[in-house]
Amino acid sequence: MHALRLALTDPRFDACAVTGALAVQAGAREALEKAAALAAAEPVGAEPAAEPVGAEPAGPYPDRLAAAVEAAGTTVQRPELGTLVAAVPAGPAEREAATAAVAAVDDEAVRLRTAVKSRDGFFTTFCISPYSRYIARWCARRGLTPNQVTTASLITALIAAGCAATGERWGYVAAGVLLLVSFVLDCTDGQLARYSLQYSTMGAWLDATFDRAKEYSFYAGLALGAARNGDDVWALAVGSMILMTCRHVVDFSFNEANHDATANTSPTAALSDRLDSVGWTVWLRRMIILPIGERWAMIAVLTAFTTPRIVFYALLIGCAFGALYTTAGRVLRSLTRRATRTDRAARALADLADSGPLAELQARLLRGRAGSFGSVYVAALGTLVMIAGAVFLPFGDLRLIAVAVIYVMTAGLAVAAPLKGALDWLIPPLFRAAEYVTVLALAVRADVPGALPAAFGLIAAVAYHHYDTVYRIRGGTGAPPHWLVRTIGGHEGRVLLITALAAVLVSREADFPVALTALAVFVALVVLVESIRFWVSSGAPAVHDEGEPA
């Protein structure tokens, strides 16, 4: 039964099949109709009329339809059945053998085992999943949905952040325990979805956004708790959020640039594959990048037994090492694989770049004359100039506006040509770093109460927009509507606006946090309203989470 459920009830794929069964969503219905029309002369279940003598039987009618749908260019998902059995017996002896094979399978054990991600971190695999899968089954038998478990995980994490914000030792201990409980529930919701095959568009949106909301809310709670004890760690909290978001954008950009590239091999990738054959190296390489399980466990333990400042130091060091390790490996792969990237990948990278009207205008003017420049090197130059100006120039210095104008120009030049270069996947994370670090640097140099918390809110709102863009692209529906990107200015428009605000408010620095807060509220409202509208609509994708651990 579970084999049929895998093939017939999974909404994530347009077409899905196992032996003797084919199911299609609306996106593959036209391909199915064409395939059925070609086979209309054949009665359902019959063999083709012109079968050559001695040839193998063509197989069940649904299998022939699935082959025709796939031949027409529509991908047909064929779930890995493992020990599950799906067969269409042709006679009494085959029927008896198939019945015995089905009876020999422990269907419930298979469901429990496959409820766990096939690829996950060490802590999650060995410390959480051995029992969280049973929690998932308990939830399924009581009619709970993955969305309800996801919401419970968010509420638990917010309570944990509130406990951390007390600044008391009991609060830190409670926060650490509750953060681990939240992570258990976070694993359980996905396992419940896989156990009961309850994938949904709303669940995709909740799961995609709540992880970041939980983690970044906890950062804010730690900063508030430290402030109660006279230790200002808001800059560390903002820096941790920036590092985490940029690291994720590196992952997303690299995957989008390469998942459908041709000639997509390299000596570096071959070495990684050879290392995968040595079991302990797989777990070591998964642990050192500090994925979500290891990261949250570290945060929880350090919160309970140390101080927020130590938590953030450990987080920054660990995540910086993980980011350097993964990024260096991907750069080496990109330089050695000589892959040819598709137009779809170039479009995805352009969408991830989040270019606003200023960059678009320049790209339009330069289109046709661009391409002789290395796009990624132009973006890197603009990013370095912008960050250096924000860090080293005095707050409100008019020269910073000139630096921002240079950044706007380089941002337009970088996206003027299709992003098909070997390292062009670095352009979106470079732009994220330029924008986020500029906001952080200006808030630090303003040196007024409330500037850093306001910067935290603004970066969180913009980061939500960037994560929302990623998950829309991963779901195959494309980037957010163009009017949204234009309304919130694009990355280069926001950088120019923030530097102009700093110059205008240089004599009234106390108003700078108010301006950042107003901008954060505006961005959050526009982005959230459109995001909620999209993810609850019928056109939203059921994004699956079987990729690399976050």
Image: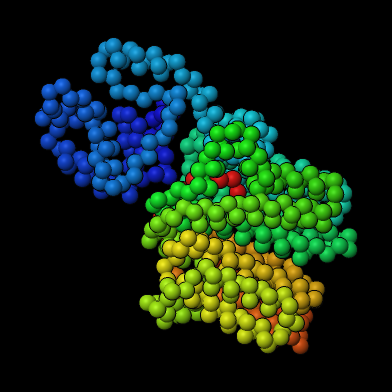
Q: Is residue 537 left or right of residue 286?
A: left
Q: Is residue 287 left or right of residue 99?
A: right
**Is 546 above or below relative to 314?**
above
Residue at position x 59%, y 55% in the image = 327
Image location (x, y in percent) of residue 431 = 57, 68
Residue at position x 64%, y 63% in the image = 460
Q: Is residue 483 visible?
A: no
Q: Is residue 96 left or right of residue 192?
A: left
Q: Is residue 254 left or right of residue 435?
A: left
Image location (x, y in percent) of residue 117 = 55, 37
Residue at position x 64%, y 54% in the image = 323
Image location (x, y in percent) of residue 254 = 51, 55
Number of numbered markers: 0
**Is 381 above or below relative to 181?**
below
| 258 or 309: nearer the viewer | 258
Q: How is the image coloured?
A: rainbow
**Is 151 above or below relative to 483?**
above
Image location (x, y in percent) of residue 101 = 40, 16
Q: Is residue 278 visible?
A: yes
Of the 4 image quadrants, the one containing the N terminus is top left
Q: Quadrant of residue 128?
A: top right
**Is 482 above or below relative to 118?**
below
| 521 or 326: nearer the viewer | 326
Residue at position x 48%, y 60% in the image = 422
